[in-house]
Image: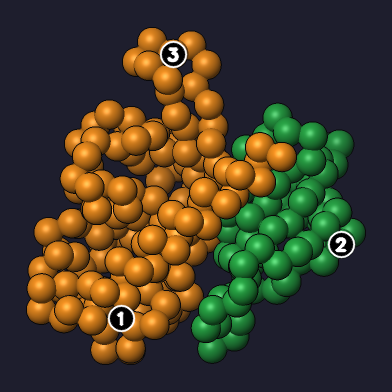
Chain colours: A orange, B green
Amino acid sequence: MELAKVLSQVELFDGLTPSELEQIARICQERSYRSGEVVAQQGATGDELFVIWEGLVEIVHSGSPQDPEPRTMVNLGQGQVFGEMALVDFGPRSATVRVVSDTARLQAIRRDDFLAVCEEHHRVGFVVMRNIAADLSFKLRHQNLMGR
Amino acid sequence: MAPIFKVSYVVAGGGHPGAIVNEDQKPVVGEKVQLGKDEFEVVEVVDLIPARGDFSFLHVTVRPLKN
């Protein structure tokens, strides 16, 4: 399927026009991973946002570098995003992301590329930032439900 | 565009972190779902927040199926 069409099915890009989706598609880089591969390491510098095209990843958080029992916070599948915190706050990765399905196909978007699109097309920046906030809110709601 | 169901899967009984996944079809009670290498049965489906655009947001409780 055409990348822009796939991106239209990702909540992060909900509300973008076809031409705006094309702008985003142009800055995507496809990556493929196998089961067990680490996509992002907690504490590392990160400047990319990832969109899951296919597969399932686990988000694992350690209380400290020597934590003997890191905790899997959530699994994320098709259509979900991770790495958005680094896009927004420029901080280190807050968790480790590991592939748990046999394979995974991701689309990576570099922060500088994304911000350049936002500078040129302010509406894209507004819509995506609003959707990032909604996605973070959904993840918080999921965590709240886990604690019931 | 066809509706998209953004689902928060929560596993009854704890011990599993659950998952967030986009689905093409709305999950129904009794249906089996695969999350990674594990299989589960849907036991409850509720709207988590109001739908927006083409997206519906669901909370689905599942229970593990023994292999």
Q: Which quadrant of the structure image shows residue A12?
A: bottom left
Q: Quadrant of residue A109?
A: bottom left
For the residue marked with disc 2, what is the amino acid? Answer: Val
Which residue appears at 75% of the width and 64% of the height? Answer: B46
Residue B38 disc label = none
Decide which of tag 1 and tag 3 comes sooner along the chain: 1
Q: Are marks 1 and 3 in contact (CB under 8 Å)?
A: no
Q: Amino acid at mark 1?
A: Leu
The answer for how far apart the CA atoms under marks 1 and 3 are is: 41 Å
Q: Which residue is mark 2?
A: B29
At 24% from the left and 53% from the top, the residue drawn is A87
Chain identifier of the residue bearing label 3 in the image: A
- When the figure is inspected, residue B39 is found, relative to residue A5, above or below; the finding is above
Same chain for mark 3 and mark 2? The answer is no
Q: Residue B51 appears at what percent x and percent y?
A: 60, 77
Q: Secondary structure at mark 1?
A: helix
| Real-space Cα separation, disc 3 to disc 2, in angstroms | 38 Å
Q: Which residue is mark 1?
A: A21
Left or right? Give the position of B42 relative to B15.
right
Relative to A148, B17 lies left or right: left
Out of A57 and A115, give the one closest to the viewer.
A115
Which amino acid does the dot numbered 3 rest on?
Answer: Asp
Q: Position of residue A1 (x, y in %)?
A: 44, 78
Whether label 3 touches label 2, CB < 8 Å: no
Residue assigned mark 3: A67
Marked residue chain, label 1: A
Q: Are marks 1 and 2 on the same chain?
A: no
Q: Chain of mark 2?
A: B
Q: Position of residue A134 (x, y in %)?
A: 44, 63
Quarter of the view holding residue A46: top left
Query: What is the C-alpha distance between the residues marked 1 and 2?
Result: 35 Å
Q: Secondary structure at mark 2?
A: loop
